[in-house]
Image (spheres, rainbow, N blue to C red):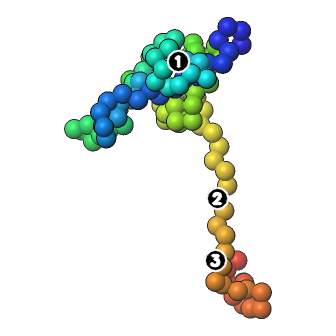
Amino acid sequence: MGQYAGKAIKLVRWGFSKHPFYVLTVSRTRIARNAGRRFEDVGWWDPSPAGDGNMHLGLKFERIKFWLASGAKPTDKVSRLFERVGLIPEKPQPPHYNPKPENVDTKWRPDLLKKMNS
C-alpha cells in the first residue's frame, strides 16, 4: 500500500440546487468530500438526463486504474459506476428472500402449505 494508503475515490457535488453535477476525485478517506484538498480529479458524472435522455459520464481510465492499483478504494456509488462501465467486476448480489405473508396461517392447513410451496 505504501504512500497511497487511506485514499478513496469519491464523488464531490457541484452544480445548483436540484441540478447536481459530480466530480470524481481522489482524496484521503477522512477528508470531507467538499473540503477542497484532493490529489486529482479523475472524471465527472452528470446524473440529470440530458436532451438525449441519457446521463453522461466522463472518466480518465488510465488514472483511475493507477489509483485503484495504488490502493485507493472507491465509495459505494463510485464502485457501482465503475461496475457499469466495466472497470471493476460486479459484486454478486445477495439471494432474494420472499417471506410468507403474515396473514396466511398454514400451520393447521396442509393443503394451503402445499399450494404455497409448489
Q: Residue at x 50, y 14 (%)?
A: 37
CB contact under 8 Å: marks 3 and 2? no
Q: Earlier in the sequence, mark 2 or mark 1?
A: 1
Image point 66% across, 84% down: which residue?
Answer: 104
Q: Which residue is mark 2?
A: 96
Residue farthest toward the left in the current orientation of the protein: 51
Which secondary structure, mark 1?
A: strand
Mark 3 or mark 2: name the one nearer the start of the chain: 2
Instruction: Say if residue 104 shows up in the picture.
Output: yes
Provide the secondary structure element on which disc 3 rests: loop
- Residue on which the image places disc 3: 101
Q: Position of residue 89 (x, y in %)?
A: 60, 32
Question: Which numbered disc, 2 or 1, marks the residue closer to the eye?
Answer: 1
CA separation in Å, label 2 and label 1: 34 Å
Query: x, y percentage for residue 95?
Result: 67, 55
Is 87 situated above or below 113? above
Amino acid carrying mark 2 in the image: His
User: Which residue, as the protein is rendered here, is positioned at the far top?
Assistant: 3
Task: Decide: few, some or many residues near mark 3? Use Cα within 10 Å; few <14, some 14-19, many ≥20.
Answer: few
Disc 1 marks which residue? 26
Q: Position of residue 22 (x, y in %)?
A: 40, 28
Viewer-proximal residue, 24 or 83?
A: 24
Crowding near pointer 1: few (<14 within 10 Å), some, many (20+)? Answer: many
Marks 3 and 2 sit apart, C-alpha to C-alpha, by: 15 Å
Please name the residue shown 66% across and 18% down the image. 6
Q: Nearer the viewer, residue 106 or 47?
A: 47
Instruction: Say which quarter of the image contains residue 21.
Output: top left
Decide if residue 61 is in sight here: no
Image quadrant in which you'd find residue 90: top right
Q: The C terminus lies in which quarter of the figure?
A: bottom right
